[in-house]
Amino acid sequence: MNKLKILILGLILSTLVICGCVEESKSIHIWAGKGFKEPLIAISKDFSEKENVKIDFSFVGFYEMVKHVNKTNADIVIAPKKYELFNVRTIELLEKKGLVKDSKPFIKRIPVIVVRKGSDINSLSDLNGKKIALINQTKYHIPGGCLGNEIVRKEKINGTFIFISPKNLINAVKEEKADATIVWLDTIKKDDTIKVIPIDGYELQLYIAIINDNEVVRKYVDYLLSHKEEFEKYGWR
C-alpha cells in the first residue's frame, strides 16, 4: 500500500510539473556601478514580485566589471560603452571578449555645476577666477567622485581650488567657502538655496548589455527600458 501511495504521489507531481502548475524558480544576476544601486534596486522590485524572479545584484566599479564579469556570474551588465573623461570602456571591452550578446542605450548620468542661488555663474567658462570646491584625491577615492577635478583639468579652468571631502562639496558652496563645485546630479538633495547647471558634453551614457540571453532576461531589459522615467526621480536622465 505504501509503495502504491508513493507511486501515485510521484505521478501527481510529475503531472503538475508538466502542466506548469509547479513553476520553476527563475533568477537573474545584474552587474552595475555603485552609484546606480539605490534606483536600480527600488525600481527592479516590482518586476521581481510580478514575474516571480529573484534578482541578484553586484555593484562594483566599471574597471572591476571588465576583470570579473563572465558567462557564469552575470546575465546583464549596466555600464558605459565608452567614457573618455575617466578612460572607461566597460561594454566595449566586454564586447571584445565576446561576452555581449546584445546592448542597448539606457540612461545618462548628468554632471552639473552647483552654485548659490543668485550667482552669476552659468557655464564652465564662468568658473575662471572663481573659488571651486574639488575632492581631495589624496585622501578620498570614490567611483566617479573625481568628476569635478577631471572636468576642471580637461577644460583648463583657472581658479582658486579648495580640496575637501566629497560630503562637503555642496556645503562649501552653501557656506560661501567656494563659489561653485561640480558633482553628479543624482547625488544632490533638493535644496532651494542652490542653483544647478547641467554641463553639456560630459554626460555618462549607460548601456544595458545582455551576457546570457533568455526570455526572463529580455523581459527584464524591456521592463527597465519602459521605466526610464522612474529613474529621473533619482536624478538620472
Image: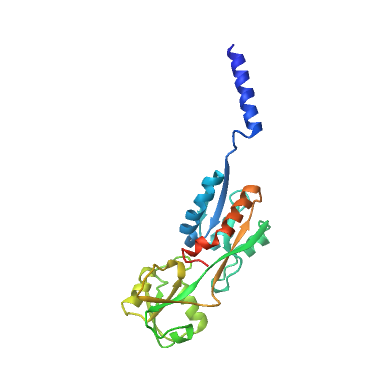
Q: Is residue 120 above or below residue 48?
A: below
Residue farthest toward the top in the current orientation of the protein = 1
The figure's colour scheme reads rainbow
> Residue drawn 63% across and 55% down?
210
> Residue drawn 57% across and 62% down?
79
Residue 2 in the image: state x and y as whole percent. Answer: 58, 13
Residue 80 in the image: state x and y as whole percent. Answer: 58, 65
Residue farthest toward the left in the current orientation of the protein = 175
Residue 31 quadrant: bottom right
Residue 132 quadrant: bottom left
Residue 194 in the image: state x and y as whole percent. Answer: 37, 76
Q: Nearer the viewer, residue 219 or 101?
A: 219
Q: How many marks?
A: 0
Q: Nearer the viewer, residue 137 or 84?
A: 84
Residue 227 in the image: state x and y as whole percent. Answer: 55, 58
Q: Quadrant of the N terminus?
A: top right
Question: Is residue 144 visible in the rendered structure shown here?
Answer: yes
Question: Is residue 145 visible in the rendered structure shown here?
Answer: no
Q: Nearer the viewer, residue 218 or 170?
A: 218
Q: Is residue 127 above or below residue 224?
A: below
